[in-house]
Image (cartoon, rainbow, N blue to C red):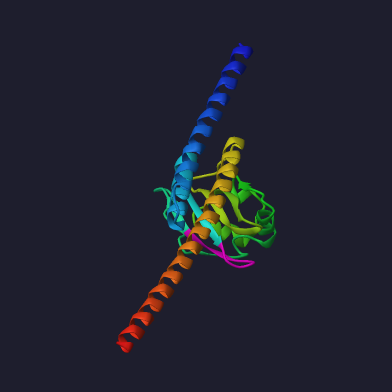
């Protein structure tokens, strides 16, 4: 009986791994298909929320050494507070936690009320209906570009190793897509500048010719 139960569990684990791999592959393909930043971020939060059946997924853009803001949100009906545009500083994410993100670590909390967090942090998270959360760093180059945050609002949640592994893999691909998007935008901006310069030079030449005539 125990052998049969163990075999069934092993089969289920393999099935879950296969399903996760297939879903990750499809998600990564959809993300890399995009060139513009808004589409990349929008697809990311929506796909992650559906994949994990989470209440809310957000992306924080880290714009200074100690602060950032929420740039995009995907939320279900349970998460009534959208958090879009929310300023993120040391009250919500202490400096020691930011440093861990800079080191590439994922932070998972099953229950904010039992995690030994600072009281001010608990209050801010509670005000946004967060009970359990996962933070995944989005590193571009050597810098912390931002954070992918997954929230559970309707109660505690024990995050599974397979879920953590999937988030880590996906975050790597999202960071690559972000970097490619930034390079693409730089090229587009340069092309626009060059086109304007060509038009201005052409207009000057035409005006000079007309003056001579």
8 vs 68: above or below? above
Q: Position of residue 27 (x, y in %)?
A: 47, 41
Is residue 144 inside the magenta stretch?
no
Is residue 69 inside the magenta stretch?
yes
Q: Nearer the viewer, residue 95 or 201?
A: 201
Kindly indicate the quadrant of the structure image that contains residue 92: bottom right
Q: Nearer the viewer, residue 15 or 33?
A: 33
Q: Position of residue 153 (x, y in %)?
A: 49, 48
Residue in view at x 62 percent, y 18 percent: 6
30 vs 2: above or below? below
Mark yes or no: residue 53 visible.
no
Kindly indicate the quadrant of the structure image that contains residue 167: top right
**Split into 4 quadrants, where in the image is the N terminus?**
top right
Mark yes or no: residue 65 visible.
yes
Q: Position of residue 64 (x, y in %)?
A: 61, 68
Q: Nearer the viewer, residue 128 or 166?
A: 166
Residue, far top: 1
Span shown in magenta: 62-71
Q: Position of residue 142 (x, y in %)?
A: 66, 58
Residue, far front: 213
**Split into 4 quadrants, where in the image is the C terminus?**
bottom left
Q: Nearer the viewer, residue 143 or 48?
A: 143
Residue in view at x 41 percent, y 73 percent: 198
Q: How many marks?
A: 0
142 vs 168: above or below? below
């Amino acid at each position: 009986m125990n052998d049969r139960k163990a075999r069934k569990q092993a089969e289920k684990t393999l099935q879950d791994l296969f399903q996760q791999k297939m879903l990750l592959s499809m998600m990564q393909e959809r993300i890399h298909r995009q060139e513009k930043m808004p589409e990349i971020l929008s697809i990311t939060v929506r796909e992650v929320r559906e994949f994990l059946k989470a209440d809310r997924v957000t992306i924080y853009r880290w714009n200074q050494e100690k602060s950032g803001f929420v740039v995009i949100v995907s939320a279900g009906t349970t998460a009534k507070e959208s958090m879009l545009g929310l300023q993120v500083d040391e009250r919500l994410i202490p400096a020691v936690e930011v440093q861990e993100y800079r080191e590439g670590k994922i932070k998972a909390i099953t229950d904010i009320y039992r995690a030994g967090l600072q009281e001010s942090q608990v209050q801010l998270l509670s005000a946004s209906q967060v009970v359990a959360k996962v933070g995944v760093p989005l590193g571009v180059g050597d810098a912390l570009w931002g954070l992918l945050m997954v929230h559970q609002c309707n109660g505690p949640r024990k995050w599974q190793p397979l879920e953590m592994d999937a988030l880590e893999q996906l975050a790597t691909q999202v960071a690559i897509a972000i970097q490619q998007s930034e390079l693409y935008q730089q090229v587009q901006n340069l092309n626009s500048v060059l086109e304007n310069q060509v038009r201005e030079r052409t207009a000057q030449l035409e005006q000079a010719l007309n003056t001579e005539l």
